[in-house]
Amino acid sequence: MLTVFESLPKGLLNCEPNELHDFLPGPSLIHLAGEIKQPLFISVLLHGNETTGWYAVRELLKEYQEKPLPRALSLFIANVAAAKEAVRHLNTQPDYNRIWKMEEDRIENEMVHEVLRQMEQRDVFACIDIHNNTGRNPHYACVNRLAAPFFQLATLFANTVVYFIKPDTVLSLAFSNLCPAVTIECGKPTEPNGIDHARGYLSSVLDLQELDEQSRDVHDIRVFHTVAIVKLKQGITIGQKGENVSLQISPELDQLNFSELIPETIMAVTNQDDFMPIEAINEFGKDVADRYFEVKNGTLRTIRTVMPSMLTLDTEIIRQDCFCYLMEQLDLSTTLSA
């Protein structure tokens, strides 16, 4: 499934995301030389409708058409078939950011193995996976290890950092065994400031000579630990306010992202007063929904202080992925190790 290039295919930098399939036969890994040989790995379009990464990389590489890159760069352009249709993934495909643990027997396993093998062979310097949100969220970075090089990579992008180890099938977690790795979340794909922010960030990382191995000043960093992934239970339907579904969400739901929710905050209206419609799976695989939520008076509401992320009004994304993530703030000064 993987095609490897040692230079940019002609005309690629003029492509819109939905045109990449005309130049690339499928998932593609493009190795570009630079003044420092140890490459930066950049992943874009793991989700075909999250286009900021491609636009940012495209603008960055246009700057270096007549001059060498400061560091070698390996660009992974992932789901071009989904990008053609402007969807997260095709119905015939798995989610391309849920395939990197390789426990299931998938046709994509060979691609995953080859990407990791090639980047290990090239002694990859760092990994950046670029994503968008469908709901309103600040720009933030995600890491999978509490170590200084990971936080340096993250805080070059944003002072809001999320640490998670579940789901453990994401690209950044696989790469964290090879090098410092980060996922950057650049807001909605329709927002131009996300492209500018990502492009500037990539340029800064390309210019780095090395990453710090020692802890840095952490006073200005907000670090949140993802403690549970909230998903719909099987058979639960979801829609907007007034629709005939199990759960109705309000048009303001995604305004709650990265806000500290007090107990009794209503998350949705439900038509089943005696049934918990969601599950909240913690890092140990246990459903802890009853620790955070209750169903009361026809509503799904919080029962303790909690902070959500990735809330969205896109019900298709909720069905495909999750309702939200639940986070708690970390004291980085006591948890960060070199």
Image (cartoon, rainbow, N blue to C red):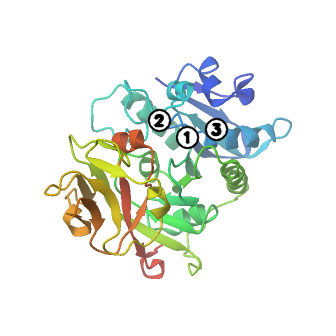
Rate crowding at label 1 as few (under 14), some (14 to 19) or many (20 or more) other CA atoms within 10 Å. Answer: many
Query: Which residue is pictured at 50% across the width and 51% down the height?
Result: 135
Q: Observer-nearest residue: 240 or 173?
A: 240
- The residue that label 1 is drawn on is 50
Q: Which x, y percent locates residue 69?
A: 76, 44
Q: Which mark is residue 295?
A: none
Q: From this viewpoint, which residue is outermost toward the left?
A: 274
Closest to the observer, 166 or 116? 166
In the rendered structure, are the residues bearing label 3 and label 2 in contact, judged by CB atoms less than 8 Å apart? no
Mark 3: which secondary structure? helix
Check contact, mark 1 vs mark 2: CB within 8 A: yes
Instruction: Give the image location of residue 208, x and y in percent.
Output: 70, 58
Left or right, 240 with respect to 333, comes to left
Tag 2: residue type?
Arg
From mark 3 to mark 2, how far is it between C-alphas?
A: 14 Å
Q: Is residue 275 left or right of residue 35?
A: left
In terms of image quadrants, where is residue 20?
top right
Where's residue 330, x and y in %? 42, 75
